[in-house]
Image: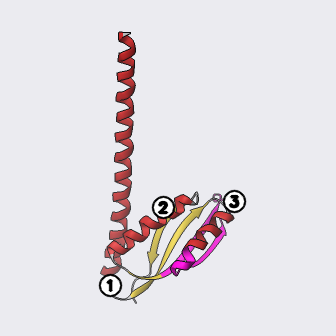
Amino acid sequence: MNSMWMVLVGVAAVALAAVRIVGSVRRLRKAQAEDWDEQQVKKLRALGGDPFRPYDVDFFFGLPDEPACERLKAALVPEGCAVDYRAIPPDTGSGFSLHARKQLRLSVTEMQEHSARYRALAGQHGGSYDGWSAAPAR
């Protein structure tokens, strides 16, 4: 009976450690994603970007199949995005690449909000959000 308690305590300790590790990894990933958005906005501003002017911002997604692309497109178009997608060539991978374009002002908080929303949307459709880009001011 005493050894049974020791086994249960050991299993509980391992489970608690696993939960803490998973939580730490998730917080780190979120912080890195938010830092990336901030770095991109700062880089564009350093290249002469005007924070009050809207830019064409390109968002990129990886999705498993065409129906997932259509469902994500249906969610993005009402938000003002122009969307296109194509199959990834078999020699470089599998699935589909979806590209959405929307005019936005480049503020750190706004871009972090878009990235968080698009990350969640991609996950709901079995895919991944691969980030965004915008051309610097000319």
Quadrant in the rendering for residue 96? bottom right
Q: Residue 69 got which mark?
A: none
The amino acid type found where label 1 is placed reads Pro
Residue 126 on image: x %, y %: 58, 57
Residue 129 on image: x %, y %: 50, 63
Residue 108 on image: x %, y %: 33, 73
- Residue sitting at x 42%, y 82%: 104
Callout in the foreground (2, 1) = 2
Which quadrant: the N terminus? top left
Q: In the rendered view, how is the structure colored?
A: secondary structure
- Residue sitting at x 47%, y 62%: 119
Nearer-the-camera pick, 53 or 45: 53
Instruction: Find numbered disc 1 in the image and state the secondary structure of the residue it sits on.
Output: loop
Q: Residue 90 got which mark?
A: 3
The amino acid type found where label 3 is placed reads Pro
- Between marks 2 and 1, how big is the CA–CA gap? 26 Å
Lower position in the chain sequence, tag 2 or tag 1: 1
Q: What residue did someone put label 2 on? A: 120
Find out whether residue 80 is within the magenta segment: yes
133 shown above or below 92? below
- Residue sitting at x 56%, y 73%: 99
104 shown above or below 92? below
**Most distant residue in the top direction:** 1
Which span is picked out in magenta?
Answer: 76-102
Q: What residue did someone put label 1 on? A: 51
